[in-house]
Image: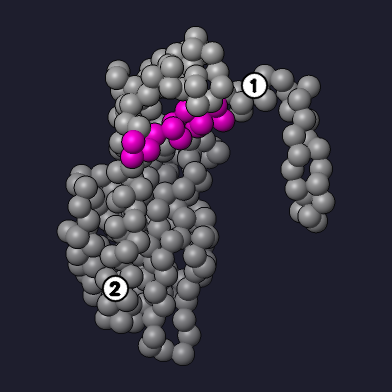
Amino acid sequence: MARTIAESDDGDAEVIALPGADRGAIQSIERAAMVLALFDQHTRALTPALVADRLGLNRTTAHRYLQSLQASGFLNPAYGPGPLVDQLSSLVSTRQQILSLAPTVMRQLADRSGLTSVLSFLGRSGAVVSIVEEANAGTIVLTVRVGTVLELKAAQSRVLLAFQSDPNVVSRMHAGLNGIEARQEQAELALVRRDRVAWADLGRVGLASVAVPVFGSSDVQAAMAVLGTTTMLPPSELSSTPVQLLREAADQLSSLVTI
């Protein structure tokens, strides 16, 4: 059984045993990453000879890695960057655009609405808060920390799942729900797709949040929301001023994103 070193919560090193098969899989991933890292401004396509020489492999092994990466979409038939690399690059590029453009739009939204504005991207288990612009007006400010992973029933998580193009993502996110809960969430997501607006259902008396999608081309890229009290942000009132201001801000940001 293979072992690896990790750091415990108190800072001490501890040994974690890994089954041989698991360690082999990890080594394969590490080797694949090393192969992909060979791309640079001078190397736009790989060959078994080049991979073997730079990584110290025999050519048969190098060729096998290239074939596997090509079959997985990381490489194209000529062993240049493949469609999956292009997809990931586009995602990173789009997120960088949004992170650069969003603060100005969200600051204006917070000032006009008097509510804290939030922008999130989809993480592995829910929306992940990435930008927060707090309201300046009033003596009490509702906010959320950057990096917070929001619950499935949070407005931003619902928006990101409702417009998710990969149904497997939604299925994975809902895997921990029982049958009734899953059906209820599916019904909520259908309403979000219809109205293009999501409301939180977190059971926190007196607090409300509403979110709308930020699109790039046709795919949802992020969720933008405002937070407030139920008095400032009456739940389910689609025609209220805060919701209209939120829609305008998200549409503005979507129009600025180029893919």
Residue under label 2: 104
Q: Residue at x 53, y 40 (%)?
A: 177
Q: Is residue 171 above or below residue 190?
A: above
What x and y, as percent, mark residue 60?
49, 9
Q: Residue furthest bottom?
A: 139
* Dot 2 amino acid type: Thr
Q: Residue at x 37, y 45 (%)?
A: 161
Question: Closest to the observer: 18 or 222?
Answer: 18
Question: Closest to the observer: 204 or 228?
Answer: 228
Q: Is residue 136 left or right of residue 65?
A: left
What x and y, as percent, mark residue 94?
30, 51
Lower position in the chain sequence, tag 2 or tag 1: 1
Residue under label 1: 24
What x and y, as percent, mark residue 132?
42, 70
Q: Residues within 10 Å of mark 2 (few under 14, many from 20)?
A: few
Q: Is residue 25 visible?
A: yes
Q: Which residues are magenta?
A: 29-42
Quadrant of the frame with the N terminus: top right
Q: Residues within 10 Å of mark 1 (few under 14, many from 20)?
A: few
Q: Is residue 93 left or right of residue 72?
A: left
Q: Could you tell me which secondary element the residue under label 1 belongs to? A: helix
